[in-house]
Amino acid sequence: MKKKKSYWAMAKDVIRKSDIVLEVVDARFPGDSRNFVIERLVRDLNKKLIIVINKVDLVPEFFVKKVTKEFSKEFPTTYISAQKRHGTKNLFNIINKLRAGKSVKIGVVGYPNVGKSMIINVLKGRHSASTAATPGHTKGIQLLRIAGNMMLVDTPGVTTIKGKRSLASKCAIDVNSAEDPIELVESLIAILAEKKPKAFVDRYGVPVENPSEFIAKIAKKYNLIMKGGMPDIRRAAIKIYTDWLKGRLKVYWL
């Protein structure tokens, strides 16, 4: 509980210190990865917000444009593949338009593993904030200079989603250190199979009929076997979750 409060305290601190706030969302589930509490706080403090849709290389172009058009009704919105450095020019154009030549501090917020550190690297033009495919990797508040009159404020991902199902679907947990990764991944499979059941057949050649049985089948398919010949359900669950985390399972929704 203290950890969540700490995240919230840092996020609020970032927003208060910033003139412009970049809210980074995942292109695969952009609506679900928006943080409406953060957005309300930005409005209440009279700050400027830009929604940055990241990881657009993982979804079709028509979907990205649809989401951008929808979100732009509320806030300036742009899309980017931070990993491939696509869309960075438009992001800078929006920032420069909002700051109107003034010196500004730019805050970066978002749920864990939406790619905040990659956005920071794009803004700085080099790898300044370390990145990893582990949710919550960035530690502590950082103040980074990205230009003579622009400073960047970063905070760890803020986890405010209630329920393990939602946490798993948003890549907001470190499944490797979870007490029961199997339960979490079963919930994730149920969510993704409801959205696009064909994604599992495309990836593994195995349909989902029951999440727990599906994990066991994946263990056998990839020879994840424990001593005694039993399928290693934990390792199989972590494999499935990692595939989702890295975009190998092609599922997306608004």
Image: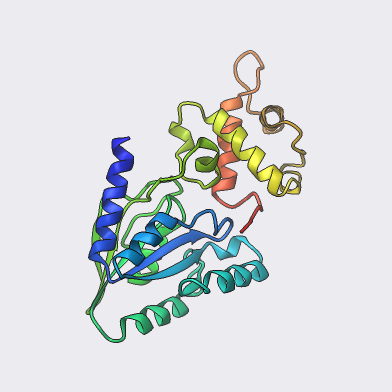
Q: How many marks?
A: 0
> Viewer-proximal residue, 117 or 252?
252
Residue extending furthest toward the front: 44
Q: Quadrant of the N terminus?
A: top left
Residue 151 sits above or below residue 187 on the image: below
Residue 82, position in %: x, y? 47, 66
Q: Is residue 179 left or right of residue 13?
A: right
- The answer to which quarter of the image holds residue 100 is bottom left
Q: Is residue 104 left or right of residue 117?
A: left
> Viewer-proximal residue, 38 or 173?
38
Residue 211, position in %: x, y? 68, 32
Residue extending furthest toward the top: 228
Q: Quadrant of the C terminus?
A: bottom right
Q: Residue at x 53, y 74 (%)?
A: 73
Residue 243 sits above or below residue 63 on the image: above
Q: How is the image coloured?
A: rainbow
Q: Residue at x 58, y 37 (%)?
A: 239
- The answer to which quarter of the image holds residue 155 is bottom left
Residue 174, position in %: x, y? 45, 39
Residue 11, position in %: x, y? 30, 54
Q: Residue at x 71, y 27 (%)?
A: 213
Q: Is residue 9 left or right of residue 132?
A: left
The answer to whether residue 139 is seen in the rendering is no
Q: Residue at x 41, y 45 (%)?
A: 160
The answer to whether residue 47 is seen in the rendering is yes
